Image (spheres, rainbow, N blue to C red):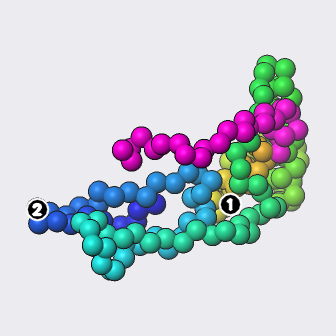
């Protein structure tokens, strides 16, 4: 999450650097904003890093930001290929008045060239993949393991 700044995250009598990093998962990435190195005194060689985490995600179609796992095998992979093609085709036809006789690859290529909204295209295609996966594969339930009182290796 670190952003370029004239301030550094670490400073002592020997020197200063941006040694401290803010690492996040891809699910949390969209929820973090306003990352900055604080001017507030930290009583340490390290600076305070501030950022906001949004608790309410107003994401298109209320997509769940949790990771889903699917049971994949050769049989349902063929079903997925059919479903992803159908989903992407319907997505493109809804968004444009292009001829349905065009090749899907050609339509996707044209869309990428004429539309500079790369992030939106990635979100649209990710949504199409999620839909196709849900239509094609059985989901694997996450094990219920407790993370309570687990040691973090780098802390000690």
Please give the label number shown on residue 120: 1
Q: Residues within 10 Å of mark 2 (few under 14, many from 20)?
A: few
Q: Residue at x 27, y 73 (%)?
A: 43
Seen from this angle, which residue lies furthest front?
149
Q: Position of residue 5 (x, y in %)?
A: 33, 71
Q: Residue at x 40, y 65 (%)?
A: 3
State whether residue 41 is above or below residue 111: below
Span colored in magenta: 131-156
Q: Is residue 85 visible?
A: no
Q: Position of residue 126 (x, y in %)?
A: 72, 48
Quadrant housing the C terminus? top left
Please give the label number shown on residue 14: 2
> Of helix, strand and loop, which one carries label 2?
loop
Which badge, 1 or 2, comes first in the chain's sequence?
2
Q: Nearer the viewer, residue 123 or 38?
A: 38
Asked whether 139 falls inside the magenta stretch, the response is yes
Q: Main secondary structure of the magenta part?
A: loop
141 sits to left or right of 45: right
Q: Is residue 47 visible?
A: yes
Q: CA distance from mark 1 to mark 2?
A: 46 Å
33 sits to left or right of 36: right
The count of marks equals 2
Asked whether 90 falls inside the magenta stretch, the response is no
Q: Residues within 10 Å of mark 1 (few under 14, many from 20)?
A: few
Q: Position of residue 58 (x, y in %)?
A: 74, 69
Seen from this angle, which residue lies furthest bottom?
40
Q: Nearer the viewer, residue 12 or 93?
A: 12
Q: Residue at x 53, y 42 (%)?
A: 150
């Amino acid at each position: 999450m670190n952003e370029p700044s004239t301030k550094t995250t670490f400073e002592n009598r020997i020197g200063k650097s941006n040694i401290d990093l803010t690492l996040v998962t891809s699910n949390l990435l969209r929820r973090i904003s306003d990352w900055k190195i604080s001017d507030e005194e930290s009583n340490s060689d390290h600076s305070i890093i501030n950022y906001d985490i949004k608790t309410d995600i107003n994401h298109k179609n209320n997509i769940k930001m949790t990771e889903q796992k699917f049971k994949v095998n050769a049989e349902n992979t063929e079903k997925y290929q059919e479903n992803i093609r159908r989903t992407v085709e319907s997505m493109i036809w809804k968004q444009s008045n292009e001829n349905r006789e065009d090749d899907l690859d050609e339509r996707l290529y044209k869309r990428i060239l004429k539309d500079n909204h790369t992030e939106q295209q990635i979100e649209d295609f990710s949504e199409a993949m999620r839909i196709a996966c849900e239509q094609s594969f059985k989901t694997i339930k996450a094990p219920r393991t407790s993370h309570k009182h687990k040691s973090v290796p780098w802390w000690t």
